[in-house]
Image (tube, rainbow, N blue to C red):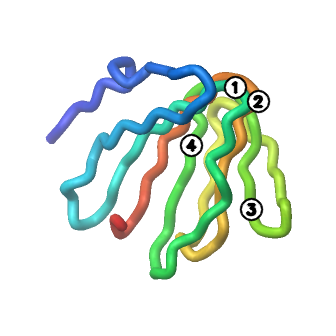
Amino acid sequence: MQVIKLSETNEFKPGVMKRFFLVETSEHFKIINFNLDAGVVFPVHSHDLDGELSIQVLEGKGWFLGENDAKIPAEKGDILISEIREPHGVEADTQMRILVTIAPPI
């Protein structure tokens, strides 16, 4: 078992996205904490492989982004579930912390 203290990754840098790899050695999944300063966009992207991902909003609010300029409101407690192949991204209106889980890991 492993306990991860998310309070230890509550760090922002002005105008950028900060990334913390929380679980990256598992053959089954990867967990990453991204902290986006207000106004920062995690660009829409996809991966050419099978699998799924989740994006959970830990703090703040903004938008889940998708193909064709899709924007879905995202606030604390919301979780986006997506195929890894499906275009996905995030835009932060306020300082925003997200937790991304990818299975299988890429």
- Could you tell whether 75 is left or right of 53 in the image? right
Q: Quadrant of the N terminus?
A: top left
Q: Residue furthest left?
A: 1
Q: In the picture shown, does residue 53 fall above or below 50?
A: above
The residues tagged by marks 3 and 2 sit, at their Cα atoms, a distance apart of: 16 Å
Which tag is nearer the camera, tag 2 or tag 4? 2
Query: What's the mark number on residue 56?
Result: 4
Q: Which mark is residue 38?
A: 1
Disc 2 element: loop
- The disc at residue 66 is 3
For image coordinates 83% across by 59% down, the residue present is 70
**Mark 1, other Cα within 10 Å: few <14 / some 14–19 / many ≥20:** many
Answer few, some or many: residues within 10 Å of disc 2's Cα (few below 14, many 20 plus, some between 14 and 19): some
Identify the amino acid type marked 3. Answer: Gly
Q: Which mark is residue 101?
A: none
Report the amino acid beneath label 1: Ala
Q: Are marks 1 and 3 in contact (CB under 8 Å)?
A: no
> Does label 4 or label 3 sit earlier along the sequence?
4
Q: Amino acid at mark 2?
A: Asp
Asked where in the image residue 85 lies, by quadrant, the reply is: bottom right
Mark 4 secondary-structure assignment: strand
Mark 4 vs mark 3: in front = 3
Mark 2–mark 1 CB contact (< 8 Å): yes
Q: CA distance from mark 2 to mark 4?
A: 16 Å
Q: Earlier in the sequence, mark 3 or mark 2?
A: 3
Q: Quadrant of residue 96?
A: top right
